[in-house]
Amino acid sequence: MGLRIVNNTLPKISLRSLPGFGHQVDFNTQLLVESSVPGQPLCEQVEVDATMLVQDTWTAHQSNMNCKTVDINTHVSPRVPILDEPLKRLLSDVLSDLGCNIINAKLNVVNSLLGSRNQMLPLGALGDLPPFSILGSDSIQLDLNLLSGNAEAGAVAPTQQLPLAATLLLATGRPPQLSLSQDTLSTLLEQVQGQGALNLSITNSLMSSQSPLQGQVPESTSLSVSALFPFIPQLARSLPGSLPLELRVRMRDEPVVAVRDGRATVTLKASVDVHVPALQTSQGLLFSVDTDIVLNITPSVSDGKLQTSLALDSIKVTRSPPSLNPSAVPSLTEWLKQILTATYVPGVNDAFHVSVPLPNVLNTNLRNAEVTITDADELPGQATLEGYCSRVASMLLPF
């Protein structure tokens, strides 16, 4: 049987130090594999998990003469019977040389990042890295599971409520780059919604409590019945304009996070109920509108911690009451936008404010790390395979 690897994703590598012996190397990648069995050509995408035991000298100045792979355990899924054994044999041949190459490449990259001139730097002195991929001779990409809590003796406890995955790119001569995915941002929003923090009652007292905005809120945004007269003139014949209003914002659905061109937004599908608390309950609800509230999400690093902030991007009224003239919808939308900017967004921001301490990786100072928002497909090595069979095969290499 002829068998070749057409394409592969950037491998994820984990190293575990085995003092006195060497290292355990865990290796994960996706492969596009083609077979050339006469009358039965196959083109399959599989995932490979391999564990290698590598015996080495734990010093930077080592060669393949004193480094060898002594055991390889390979798991391929899904299992394709006709490919299973030939593919495992092919992988065993490739990975037997790859184990030592990975360890030596790791040390070379780390030395480059640390600016080390000590060619006898012991591998064990660097500690065990999180899962990583080697991008080049001076750059490495690490998968982080951000932790929350107070550091004690160099360790922190992972949060049980807010596990956050991130990718850290370290390259010589460039500031560290922390990449957050759409899924990570969604996790943050789910936590906030689970606490009910996206539902909010807005009153005059709440508006006046937003001290940073005092004196900046237009008079037209006052929460009184008179503010509605331009939109619903008939209210002037039945209600005093001085009666205070209460706006109740409630979520109708799950928040939807979107990432495009490195910019993240969350759309909140919310109903806004306009109440007059002074009236009896049956009369207190004047009307409701359904809205799409779009907020910009901006992550940043401050004092070594990951933080996030929200800002109102836009609001769209998707359903309005029959009593409202369609020509008045834009004015009502602008009024709601001013009120939400003054009160709702600051309230949600307080709930959304999460400070997650960043780990110390390779003694790299992450206080000035750049933060980007990426789709999985934008990360080096792609998260899913692209390409077709019946083309030139690629080599299975981690760098």
Image: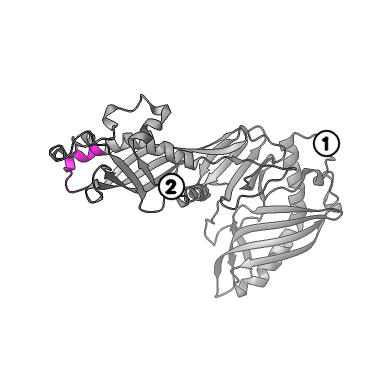
Return the residue at label 1.
118
Q: Position of residue 100 (x, y in %)?
A: 78, 53
Q: Are marks 1 and 2 in contact (CB under 8 Å)?
A: no
Describe residue 38's horizontal placement relative to residue 337 as left or right. right
Please tell me how crowded label 1 is: few (under 14), some (14-19), or many (20+) other residues with Cα within 10 Å: few
Q: Who is closer to the viewer here, 191 or 53?
A: 191
In the image, which residues are magenta? 320-332
Quarter of the picture containing the N terminus is bottom right
Can residue 154 be found in the magenta stretch? no
- Mark closest to the chain's N terminus, 1 or 2: 1
Describe residue 79's horizontal placement relative to residue 210 as left or right. right
Q: Who is closer to the viewer here, 291 or 85?
A: 291
Tag count: 2
Say which element carries label 1: loop
Which dot marks residue 362? Answer: none
Measured in 3D between alpha carbons, the distance from the residue under mark 1 to the one under mark 2, in whole angstroms, is 46 Å
Task: Please give the name of the residue rendered at 48% of the width and 42% of the height, measured from the top-left corner.
Answer: 351
Q: Position of residue 106 (x, y in %)?
A: 73, 46
Please tell me how crowded label 2 is: few (under 14), some (14-19), or many (20+) other residues with Cα within 10 Å: some
Q: Who is closer to the viewer here, 115 or 234?
A: 234
- Kindly identify the amino acid type of the residue bearing the numbered disc 2: Ala
Return the residue at label 2.
258
Q: Position of residue 134 (x, y in %)?
A: 67, 47
Residue 16 visible? The answer is yes
Q: Nearer the viewer, mark 1 or mark 2?
A: 2
Q: Position of residue 289 (x, y in %)?
A: 27, 47
Answer above or below: position of 214 versus 382. Answer: above
The residue sitting at the top extreme is: 215
